[in-house]
Image (spheres, helix red, strand yellow):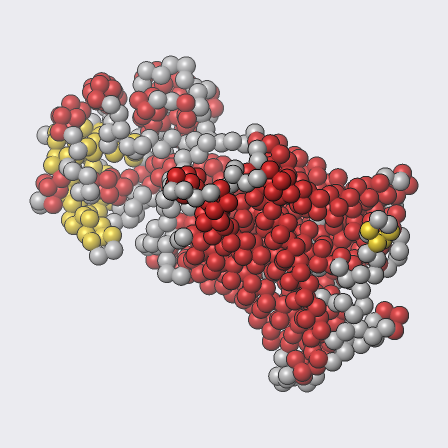
Amino acid sequence: MNTLPGPVRAALVAVPALFVAVFFAWPVAAIIRRGLSVDGVRDVFTDPGLRSVAWFTLWQAALSTVLTLLLGLLPAFVLARYRFPGRALVLAFVTVPFVLPTVVVGTAFLAFLPESWDQTAAAIIIAHVYFNLAVVVRTVGTLWGQLDPRTEDAARTLGASPRQVLWRVTLPQLRPALLAAAAITFLFTFTSFGVVRILGGPRHPTIEVEIWRLTTQAFDLEAAAALALVQLVGVTLLMVWWSRFQAGQAVRLRLRPRGVAARPRTAGQRVLVSATVIGLVAVVLVPLTRLVLGSFRGAGSGLSLAAWQALGGEIGPGPAGRTVADPWDAVLTSLRFAVIATVVAVLVGGAAAVAIAVSGRGGHLLDAGLMLPLGTSAVTVGFGLLITMDRRPIDLRGSWVLIPIAHAVVAVPFVVRAVLPTLRSIDPRLRDAAATLGASPSRVWREIDLPFLRRALVAGGGFAFAISLGEFGATSFLTRVGDETMPIAITRLLGRPSALNLAQAYALATVLMVLTLAAILAVDRLRGEAASF
Amino acid sequence: MLPSMLTVDGVRVRFGDRWVLDGASLTVGAGEIVALLGPSGSGKSTLLRVIAGLLPPDGGRVLWAGEDVTAVPAHRRQFGLVFQDHQLFPHRDVAGNVSFGPTVGGRPKAEVRQRVAELLHLVGLDGFERRSVTSLSGGEAQRVALARALAPRPRLLLLDEPLAALDRELHDRLAVDLRHLLQDLGTAGLHVTHDRDEAGAVADRVVNVDELHRR
């Protein structure tokens, strides 16, 4: 790849750099400039309403994180230490909630939880635990599966009871993974938007939801910017602290390259494994099943196709009496935006990945810059675009184009992460071999790099597609009447209290769930093939 | 003949369809050091795990001084175990490793500190308390593992190929040291090895794996 001509390399760097600068850095800078108005920031800390919002955001995130860690430990242990038929399937199953759009998870819990739980903090926290359980199971489980169990055996022969082994030997060794899982879960729950919008209602807003409310309903952009700034600083501090902390945490562990999973031997172990697997599958399935069943609930008690048939009908009058598109239109709009966002994200992310792989220091800088949108919340992206793209030189006010662009901003880091490892895994000797056989540099690129790259780009594109379908945070700021995506249409339907609208929302969420899972499954299959390539 | 302290009586262990141990029997007398000799894969390590209480047998009994301890969990048996690859705790320093047994046993801090110094002296590693276990050489790590296993004063010390990973010279030196150490302490020992010379150097009595199943 080092054989690429200079102008091509320059373009590969320039395109993604420009994209991130215009559609991410500039909007964020605008938020900072607006938010720095002294009154705004002071209000965040003195206004009792805003203070309670910040406080709620913090404590629900902390509690969600602790509960997710506690509940994730046992399944992490069982999946790491025991070998049983269907283990890979169960592991894939646990990951399902994590890849679902937040709106689908929120709606599923609305269908699943009793009505008295509506608009409670408990509902938000339960949905957060459900959503993030996979983070703990996978992060902690991966390390747990590599710890040598004989270290624990040594502790037992030294007189340590099972509890002492757990606290003094196992958990200290798992510390890096526990902290990583906690940091990721905290970040996700701290910046949670979709779940909170649907389950918390107006009674339990987090910072993200409040930014959205101030912007789209109170039209108080200064206060929204101040709150967004506080949030941005909070998240940045968390990430800086985390990267420093992690650097100081380089504990050398005795890891075994192969997994240490063994078949359950005793009756107790078999009961533990079966109970955990059944419990996990039930936990994942029950809310989603209730969602699907909810879409078939008629006005009476029996099953009905009314909601599905009514998907073609109008949602009803929109804000200010304007007509809103029907739910099927939302499906088509989502697919259209997803295709555009995928093309943009694959072009930008693919160019960036190649540029990062071929260049040294500049590559690192580009890499870090492209990862920034990953740490920032989608709400920040949407809000920033809203307040910058409304005047010259770029006036996209009233254009739907911003929506797929925002989706692409959110998706680009994922495309880069999907493509980069593949590019780096190409054995340079393959290129050398091709060159010594007489292939010109461009021929080497076509024959060697491109076939690898193509699969990785398609996989990254699948991710981008799934992300765009479910994107809600940024879209909430940019959506216009007539251009509703599925997540937006779902929340509109939920806002109308008729039983039919509710069932329609469940039906639309079911469609969104199926489409998302189909995209992720396609990516998974492609990656599997790429691995055996 | 010394009175028998450890008695292994007809222990059976099955992995899948294969019987790794099918009625293994063995005795170790008070203060006696027995070497169990056999090729790798012959079930020696499995037998040690059964005796230590880390692996429940599919049949047979383990007795100490005539008392059936088969159902006693590992942490209450007071049988120490030294692993071939030492299995030191990577997140604790040398003192943290040696002090582990007495600490979980609830001994007072001052006593634990003294015991650590005493044992490190015994294995020839004075002043190693604050060293990280990842910085130790193979021989040093194995000595720390031995000190750690002896710290809670086990009534029986099980040694699973403790010298196999060391180079020849170190191996021979440590084999002699180990014998003297166990003799001085009067601790009964069961030493598993595939090395006939090592078995002779360490043990009072050598048992071949084939003899385990002869009743």
Q: Is residue A25 visible?
A: yes
Is residue A468 shown above or below B206? Answer: below
Q: Residue at coordinates 84% horizontally, 57% vertically from top-left?
A: A397
Q: Judge from the rendering whether residue A86 lies leftward or rightward of residue B54; answer left or right.
A: right
Is residue A324 shown above or below B7? Answer: below
Is residue B116 shown above or below A141? Answer: above
Near-viewer residue (A9 or A306): A9
x, y percentage for residue B138? Answer: 32, 24
- Image quadrant assignment for residue A462: bottom right
Near-viewer residue (B133 or A12): A12
- Image quadrant assignment for residue B40: top left
- Image quadrant assignment for residue A150: top left
x, y percentage for residue A286? Answer: 56, 68
Near-viewer residue (A220 or A365): A365
Q: How many marks?
A: 0
Q: Residue at coordinates 60% horizontally, 37% vertically from top-left?
A: A6
Q: Is residue A206 visible?
A: no
Is residue A345 shown above or below A246? Answer: below
Near-viewer residue (A343 or A377): A343
Q: Residue at coordinates 17% horizontally, 42% vertically from top-left?
A: B42
x, y percentage for residue A407? Answer: 69, 56
As drawn, the residue found furthest toward the right would be A39
x, y percentage for residue A491? Answer: 74, 67
Q: Residue at coordinates 74% horizontally, 48% vertically from top-left?
A: A23
